[in-house]
Image: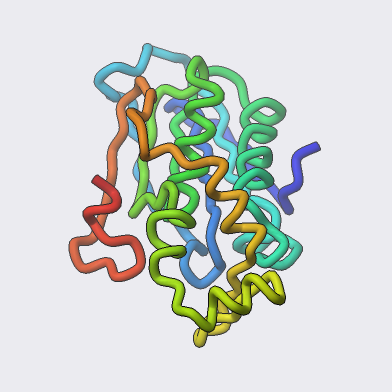
Amino acid sequence: MCAFSSATVVNGPWPAQINVSAGSEKTCSRTFVRASSNWSRAPPIEPAKIASPTTATNGASDGQFRDGVISRWRADALAVIDQLTEGPLILVGSSMGGWISCLAALSRPQRVAGMVLLAPAPDFTEKLMKPALHPEAIKALAEAGEWVEPDGAIITAALLEDGGRWSILDAEVDIDCPVHILQGGADDVVPWRHAQ
């Protein structure tokens, strides 16, 4: 069963678009993308449906971010793809949603016609978070299973451990569709070099 709070399904003259909003409400409350019908390698298709869910514990969904892990958000995205859509899809993901979009594309390659990724953060648990942890955070994660950042963000040991199981950047990423990445050069959360 898909564990997201709501989804909007509407008709449109482009491949179905899944907006994977995985991230805190303050960082991923909105994703703006213009749908395009001229993707260079996307097959010609009839009008499709658009589903725009927010995964559990993220954005406007119920639950606490501290209860989420990559496995759960991946399962949410796959459930939306499998249960609410038909035909080719354009996946849209911001930050962690970019990672979830990549995982969904790897799991459902026959369904994904393209992706638009905004400051994508695949493997952020291993490549961005763990190296930045200071000794106090490492101790809190080991002893209490979580660390509260100065800005109130909660990092859990479960998120870090589960994220390591879904790492994709240490080998060639076998996604065979058009991928458009939008990345700010001054992004201090997901550095542009990480999104390359």
53 left or right, relative to 62: left
Q: Nearer the viewer, residue 71 or 16?
A: 71
Residue 153 position (above or below residue 63): below
Residue at 55% over, 50% down: 163
Residue 65 position (above or below residue 127): below
Quadrant housing residue 2: top right
Q: How is the image coloured?
A: rainbow
Residue 103 position (above or below residue 143): above
Q: Where is residue 22 drawn, in percent x and y?
A: 55, 54
Residue at 55% over, 35% down: 50
Residue at 57% over, 29% down: 49
Q: Nearer the viewer, residue 41 or 103?
A: 103
Quarter of the figure that contains the C terminus: top left
Q: As drawn, which residue projects farthest toward the bottom?
A: 150
Q: Where is residue 162 drawn, in percent x and y?
A: 62, 49
135 left or right, relative to 184: right
Residue at 68% over, 67% down: 66
Q: Nearer the viewer, residue 14 or 128?
A: 128
Q: Where is residue 99 drawn, in percent x and y?
A: 46, 45
Quadrant housing residue 84: top right
Quarter of the figure that contains the N terminus: top right
Q: As drawn, which residue projects farthest toward the left?
A: 185
